[in-house]
Image (cartoon, rainbow, N blue to C red):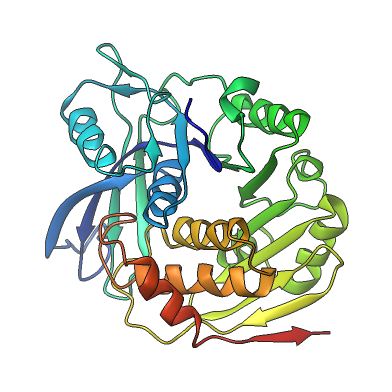
Amino acid sequence: MLPIDVFCYGEIGVDNIVQLPHLPSPELAAFPTSDSYHIGGAAANTAVWLANFGIDVALSGNRLGRDPYGRQLWQWLRKHPHLDLRLVERREEESTPFCRVMVTPDGERTFLVYGYPQASKIELQPQHLAGATYLALDLYGGEERFRAAKVAYAAGVQTAVGDVIEHDHPILPLAPLVTNSAAFMREVLPGIDILQQSRRLQATNKGIVIATDGARELIAVDQKGDAFRVQPPAVSAIDATGAGDAFRAGLLAGLLKGQPLSRAVCLGVAAGALKVQHLGAATNLPSPAEVVALADTLATEAVS
């Protein structure tokens, strides 16, 4: 392994994004307006965004096939010089996971998931994390994700994880950086107070807990339990696929560059806002300068 700053571990696959005027129903057909293919999977998306920021990052998780999806994905990933792919395995007998992503005119998406649960996984080892500051981990898998967090904890590497919304989740003590979707929190825990639940999570992980909320204001709780909010910029959202992955990459890039949490959060918000204006989670990447310029327009406000 080359020296790395972040190890991204989890989903690696392809997204087939289909734009529709509306979702189909039993009595109402939908006629797609576009159909395209993109890098997919939370780990791959985050890794590509980090590499675009100039962060040295390694990627691993599920294995890929040498099928058409796998060959195309490999070509896309190889274009990023800061991305170490030596732990991305490809096998003849594997099928590359993919998602059909139905995107409506408001930018919201609905997923059909193929192959991720069945794909074999690479087990994260301590030597894989040599030199890394963060493990960017997605939990959309099996017990290997929890084992990866334990490996990182033992190695002194900070785990950044998403969609951990229960304050007694067993991974919380191992993950000092949690980024959640407020929409997901409301779906699973109806009537939840986002700020209060974020503070409960922070009381367990003793680190940072952030809840993004699309176009609505983000809530962040820092290591001291103090909270602040950021209002994202107004944009025309075309496709929200991977917005959370872009946010996490911007956040980690800011922290790795020594920025205070408030500034790193603004970089994450800017990355997410730029992402949703284009199709694909990691296809149309803005320059780091564009992200910085948009982050410069944002402000944080303390929350009591």
Number of marks in the image? Answer: 0
Which image quadrant is residue 116 in? top left
Q: Is residue 119 visible?
A: yes
Image x and y of residue 90, in percent: 31, 19
Left or right: residue 69 compared with residue 140: left
Left or right: 112 as drawn, with respect to 222: left
Relative to 294, 197 lies left or right: right
Residue 158 location (% of width, % of height) = 70, 43
Q: Position of residue 195 (x, y in %)?
A: 75, 73
Residue at 38% of width from left, 23% of height from top?
A: 63
Q: Residue at x 30, y 61 (%)?
A: 285
Pick the front one: 214 or 27: 214
In the shown orientation, is residue 256 left or right of residue 239?
A: right
Q: Quadrant of the C terminus?
A: bottom right
Question: In this view of the protein, can residue 125 be seen by the observer?
Answer: no
Residue 80 x %, y %: 30, 44
Residue 23: which quarter of the image?
bottom left
Task: Tell me: residue 285, above or below residue 57.
Answer: below
Q: What residue lies at 82% left-to-right and 66% top-to-bottom?
A: 199
